[in-house]
Amino acid sequence: SVLDACNVRVEERDVQVEGNIVRVVHDNKRMIHYAAEEQRVGFVDFLGKSGIDLNVKSSGGIGAVHIAAKKGHADIIRALKRSGMKVEDFIANSEKGTPLEIAVLNKQRDAILEIGGIIKDTKVVDAQGEEKKRVDLVDDRGRAVLHYAADEGWHNIIPALSSIGASMNLKTSGSGNTALILASARGNKHAIEELIECGADRFMCNNAGQAPMNFIYRDEELMRSLICTKDKKTGDSAF
């Protein structure tokens, strides 16, 4: 069977066949979700050619692209795009966030790059009526995905976010903290270095007049990172 050929583990009692469309009813998931979860690229291609709805959701508004983002399955994301999934489907929200937010929160660099390449040119109007790049959209805490990466010290994904257009000097709503201020306040050395290498302004202040230096001036190692790290594009350090 197609299921056996694609090595998708699904119990027979959970499968319904309607014409040429296969559905999985267990846990309110559909076959496309299992294929995404188990990284069955060939089966995603097959389902796409069968004309099923690639964007069908399970409970919580979770779709195949959200599952692939969490798992870091960049090849599944490519297969979904290749099979006809639209750009707006790659920015669809769920109870766990958008696919990009899910990829960032799970530190899935390859998925970030893949999703980012698809949505890079999309823009959205925020609550203040300002047009922003999708990657710079802030959540109800006033933070964009870059702010979370900096605050949590997920330095490995900062270059990926930069490459898909994240604004390195974007400020949080309310306090006006940049990603570099957040990384400095948490003492995230490698995040400080990655942000500066990607073009973050090491002297930009928040709404309280605090710059990154205000949080680390007593720490010689962090100060060295802040001052001596060079912007990869310009080659500039602080001095």
Image: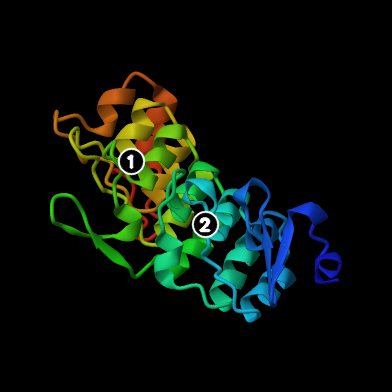
C-alpha span from label 1 to label 2? 33 Å
From where the camera sits, is residue 188 visible?
A: yes
Viewer-proximal residue among 90 and 50: 50
* Coordinates of residue 23 in the picture (x, y in percent): 67, 63
Residue pointed to by mark 2? 57
- Quarter placement of the C terminus: top left
Q: Vertical placement of 109 versus 89: above or below? A: above
Viewer-proximal residue among 17 and 83: 17
- Hey, which residue is sitting farthest bottom in the picture? 49
Mark 1 residue type: Ala
Residue pointed to by mark 1? 179
Q: Nearer the viewer, mark 1 or mark 2?
A: 2
Secondary structure at badge 2 equals loop
Circle nearer the N terminus (1, 2): 2
Mark 2 residue type: Lys
- Quarter placement of the N terminus: bottom right
Viewer-proximal residue among 171 and 180: 171
* Coordinates of residue 228 in the picture (x, y in percent): 38, 41
**Label 1 Cα neighbours within 10 Å, binned few <14 / some 14-19 / many ≥20:** many
- Image side of residue 38 versus residue 144, left or right: right
Q: Quadrant of residue 172?
A: top left
Q: Vertical placement of 230 versus 79: above or below? A: above
Q: Who's the residue at 31% across and 43% down the image?
A: 139
* Coordinates of residue 163 in the picture (x, y in percent): 43, 61
**Label 2 Cα neighbours within 10 Å, binned few <14 / some 14-19 / many ≥20:** some
Secondary structure at badge 1 equals helix
Residue 70 image label:
none
